[in-house]
């Protein structure tokens, strides 16, 4: 029952709240306390930034061998999406025909069920991507 | 820092070892290594154990103490340490053993790695495997470990024009090698069609592009070089040891077709050994997926960036080629009990350097290299070994 | 003060299944059912969709079309009969997903198909009493019909969201009245997966009685005649009932045309009138008058008299997909896939 472990990430999972380095401007999702570029200089200078939600597909794959909680969805498409703000995310790509998915295609984030703790457990929501 | 040598090696067969428990395989490999080194238990100063996830596979943590105990060493009360870095657990344990002796702290240590993956179902094993990636931001959203590597493969094909067949040729080569290795999990040769027609796991990777789940253990005995000849007349010196880390999540990298950590560790290890990549005759690299070997031979400098697929398809990395890669069969054919793999790589390199690799011997092998990877390249450890 | 709609949003899932496909499996005349119900396809939610994700999509579209700061929303209600949780509100997740602050009152509503319109009435009250500046009312469902039951041909998924306020309105809700009695025409007991219904009892004493009574009450209260309205939207459990009730009240087929979606997407239950209203607002012009009557089994009707304002001409409708666009964005399913998606196949229980 990982309730709290997912709950505390909700701002990022629901609304793509990232952090932006106040020194170099790099954007990170999940939010980071320290910029990997500026190190110590960035401590205390990381600002929350809600991403617009749009980006392009950097790579993708169709998953056939899936963990138990994704039984209903398989085969499903996983994608690495480079968001317009610079950070890259990994999630499912939905609402797209297999043939139409290409590296470079534009996608936007939407809220979907990402998992659940079994039939009696909490439901987890988060971002998935669909073609623009 | 003083020189360190490998004076003994031991391993179990890799595969689905239904009759053997975690402690059974751990001790089997350890005792074989100690026997190979002509060692008495009183000579052992410390034990290092590489293991990724005994806690989830067999609900057992604290495994270094377990192995020390069941090896009969409990009454000697030696320090026993477990090291974990996902797939690189074994290689990191080896490096810790090396550092302990190089620093002068110990004279002789035993380093082993073991994993018992078949005591849980395959679905659970996949989920545990995925904890090598970013559990919160990759696995949660549906990224399986194969899926992450499949995305690397697709990007490599996009960036460098690498073909599906070239990637698959890694598995064909490694099965050919594995067929000559009596300890390998799979000992049959396959052709390209076998790989291409096997069921998809995460497209474009199929079943035969992925190393199996395995049980197994491997162990080595390390000794200060100045004392090594007391135990063996063919000590194999560790001439290079380097380790590097990178972002945990693949999506946080600058370039997903390069494992920077392999480059950093590879350069450092080779520099320490006063060698270049072209001096290496035999190498064990981390082919948990076919694409991983493509990246490894590029990032270690054996071939140019982007040419890994072509080079493999051309036979440059087969026995008899430019550099013999994964003569053991690699993770694909020899098997991949996660924590043991790093040590199994060392066992193979030492076997080659000792000249006792039988049918798969690389003639004139003098310089060997082992590259062990954790996650999608978040940890990489590289060792260079040579005949002393 | 005037209260009404500041903004709206809608969402229809993209999968569809036809009555013919359903009939084939259960040995029924699917074609005949289709003609009888005037339903040609119904929407099916994907396995990773539910009332919460549908409500969020609709509410996010609603926010995209206006410049209201989500932090000023003081209330949010989600009405549905297929809330993902029996206990734990859908509304809190939707509220966070649209960036609302913690200074908000939230509750989930249930009243069969009129839970969403009940939410609109509540928000009107809160805004009108100056208790909140803005309220969000959402009606959404992923309703289920038992396999082979007539309801399986129509129960579908979708939702509409409305931002209720008192300023910058695109449509003023001039009046709302309700007609409610205890009439058990359709129900689902706690713990049951599928609803039950009273067969033909659901017609005259239930749907028609309440929609006609509610409609008549509204016409009386406003002092208007059917001919004055540009559009009329009635609850639509199938394509036939709204045509009949329109006639009974004196409305024409032309008036109900835009807001009648069930023939293409099935009965979206709590989403039905909200989606019908959204479809009308998608094409409405300043000055258009709208007559809407939602019906919820159990039973009750909520009736609304709405006037579209000049504000709709500068309203950013194009910032989000229209109902028509979503209805046309569709993928057909066979019964097996539909059954799998809707959880109708008995899966193996997890064993640790």
Image: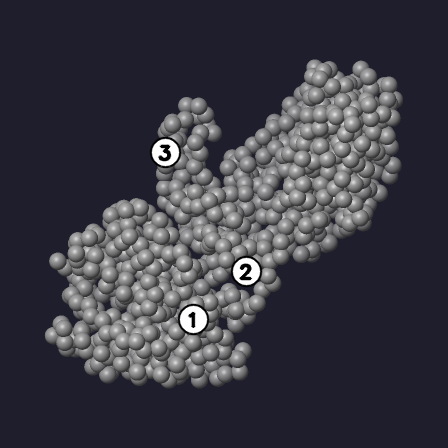
Say which element carries label 2: loop
- Give whichever of B346, C131 is nearer the camera: C131
Q: Residue at x 85, y 19 (%)?
A: B229
* Subunit under mark 3: A
- Identity of the residue furthest to the front in this view: B75
Tag 3: Cα neighbours inside 10 Å, few (<14), some, or many (≥20)?
some
Q: Which residue is mark 3?
A: A47
Q: Residue at x 39, y 31 (%)?
A: A46
Q: Nearer the viewer, mark 1 or mark 2?
A: 1
What is the distance, in whole Å, between disc 1 and disc 2 at their CAs?
27 Å
Give the numbered dot on residue A72: 2
**Which colour style is shown?**
one colour
Q: Residue at x 71, y 17 (%)?
A: B105
What is the distance, in whole Å, between disc 3 and disc 2 at their CAs?
38 Å
Say which element carries label 3: strand
Q: Position of residue C334 (x, y in %)?
A: 52, 71
* Subunit under mark 2: A
Q: Is residue C350 left or right of residue A15?
A: right
Say which element carries label 1: loop
Q: Which residue is mark 1?
A: C189
- Give whichever of B368, B75 is nearer the camera: B75
* Subunit under mark 1: C
On the same chain: label 1 and label 3?
no
Q: Is residue B135 left or right of residue B266?
A: left
Q: Position of residue C69 (x, y in %)?
A: 26, 47
Q: Are marks 3 and 2 in contact (CB under 8 Å)?
A: no
Q: Is residue B301 left or right of residue C189?
A: right
What is the distance, in whole Å, between disc 1 and disc 3 at their CAs?
49 Å
């Amino acid at each position: 029952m990982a309730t709290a472990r997912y709950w505390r990430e909700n701002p990022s999972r629901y609304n793509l709240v990232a952090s932006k380095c106040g020194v170099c401007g790099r954007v990170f999702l999940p939010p980071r306390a320290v910029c990997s570029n500026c190190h110590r200089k960035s401590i205390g200078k990381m600002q929350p930034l809600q991403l617009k939600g749009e980006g392009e597909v950097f790579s993708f794959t169709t998953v056939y061998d899936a963990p138990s909680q994704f039984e209903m969805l398989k085969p499903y498409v996983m994608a690495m999406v480079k968001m317009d703000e610079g950070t890259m995310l990994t999630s499912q790509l939905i609402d797209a025909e297999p043939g139409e998915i290409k590296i470079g295609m534009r996608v936007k984030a939407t809220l979907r069920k990402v998992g659940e703790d079994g039939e009696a457990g909490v439901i987890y929501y988060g971002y998935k991507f669909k073609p623009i | 820092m003083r020189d360190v040598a490998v004076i003994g090696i031991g391993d179990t067969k890799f595969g689905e070892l239904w009759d053997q428990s975690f402690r059974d395989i751990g001790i089997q490999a350890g005792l074989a290594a100690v026997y190979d080194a002509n060692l008495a238990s009183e000579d052992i100063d410390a034990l290092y154990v590489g293991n990724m996830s005994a806690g989830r596979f067999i609900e057992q943590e604290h495994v270094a103490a377990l192995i020390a105990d069941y090896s009969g060493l409990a009454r000697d009360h030696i320090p026993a340490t477990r090291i974990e870095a996902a797939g690189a657990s074994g290689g990191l344990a080896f490096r810790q053993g090396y550092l302990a002796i190089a620093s002068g702290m110990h004279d002789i240590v035993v380093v082993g790695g073991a994993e018992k993956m078949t005591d849980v179902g395959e679905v659970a094993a996949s989920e545990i495997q995925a904890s090598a990636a970013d559990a919160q931001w990759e696995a949660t959203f549906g990224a399986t470990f194969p899926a992450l590597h499949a995305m690397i493969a697709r990007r490599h094909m996009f960036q460098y024009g690498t073909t599906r067949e070239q990637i698959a040729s890694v598995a064909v080569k490694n099965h050919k090698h594995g067929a000559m290795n009596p300890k390998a999990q799979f000992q049959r040769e396959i052709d390209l069609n076998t790989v291409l027609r096997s069921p998809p796991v995460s497209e474009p990777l199929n079943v035969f592009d992925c190393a199996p789940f395995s049980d197994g253990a491997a162990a080595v005995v390390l000794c200060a070089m100045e004392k090594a000849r007391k135990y063996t007349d063919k000590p194999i010196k560790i001439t290079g040891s380097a380790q590097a880390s990178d972002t945990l999540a693949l999506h946080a990298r600058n370039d997903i077709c390069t494992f920077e950590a392999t480059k950093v560790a590879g350069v450092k290890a080779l520099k320490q050994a006063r060698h270049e990549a072209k001096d290496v005759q035999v190498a064990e690299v981390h082919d948990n997926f076919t694409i991983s070997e493509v990246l490894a031979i590029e990032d270690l400098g054996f071939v140019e960036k982007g040419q890994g697929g072509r080079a493999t398809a051309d036979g440059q990395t087969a026995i008899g080629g430019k550099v013999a890669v994964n003569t053991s069969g690699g993770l694909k054919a020899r098997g991949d009990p996660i924590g043991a793999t790093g040590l199994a790589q060392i066992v193979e390199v030492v076997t080659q350097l000792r000249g006792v690799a039988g049918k798969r011997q690389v003639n004139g092998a003098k310089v060997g290299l082992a590259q062990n990877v954790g996650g999608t390249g978040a940890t990489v450890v590289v060792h260079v070994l040579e005949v002393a | 003060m005037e209260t009404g709609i500041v903004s709206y949003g809608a969402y229809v899932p993209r999968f569809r299944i036809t009555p013919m496909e359903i009939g084939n499996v259960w040995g029924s005349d699917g074609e005949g059912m289709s003609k009888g119900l005037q339903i040609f396809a119904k929407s099916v939610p994907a396995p990773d969709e539910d009332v919460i994700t549908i409500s969020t999509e609709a509410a996010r579209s609603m926010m995209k079309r206006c410049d209201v700061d989500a932090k000023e929303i003081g209330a949010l209600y989600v009405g549905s009969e297929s809330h993902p949780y029996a206990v734990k509100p859908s509304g809190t997740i939707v509220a966070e997903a649209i960036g609302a602050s913690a200074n908000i009152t939230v509750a989930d509503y249930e009243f069969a198909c009129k839970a969403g319109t009940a939410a609109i009435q509540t928000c009107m009250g809160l805004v009108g009493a100056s208790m909140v500046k803005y309220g969000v009312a959402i009606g959404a469902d992923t309703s289920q019909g038992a396999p082979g039951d007539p309801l399986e041909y129509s129960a579908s998924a979708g939702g509409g969201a409305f931002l209720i306020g008192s300023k910058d309105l695109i449509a003023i809700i001039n009046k709302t009245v309700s007609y409610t009695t205890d009439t058990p025409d359709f129900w689902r007991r706690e713990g049951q997966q599928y609803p039950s219904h009273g067969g033909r009892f659901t017609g005259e004493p239930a749907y028609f009685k309440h929609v006609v009574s509610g409609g008549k009450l509204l016409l009386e209260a406003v002092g208007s005649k059917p001919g004055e309205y540009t559009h009329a939207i009635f609850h639509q459990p199938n394509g036939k009932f709204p045509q009949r009730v329109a006639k009974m009240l004196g409305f024409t087929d032309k008036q109900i045309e835009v807001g009648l979606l069930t023939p293409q997407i099935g009965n979206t239950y709590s989403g039905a009138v909200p989606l019908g209203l959204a479809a009308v607002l998608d094409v409405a012009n300043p000055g258009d008058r709208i007559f809407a009557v939602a019906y919820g089994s159990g039973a009750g009707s909520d009736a609304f008299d709405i006037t579209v304002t000049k504000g709709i001409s500068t309203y950013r409708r194009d910032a989000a997909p229209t109902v028509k666009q979503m209805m046309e964005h569709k993928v057909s399913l066979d019964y097996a896939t539909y059954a799998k998606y809707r959880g109708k196949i008995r899966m193996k229980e997890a064993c640790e």
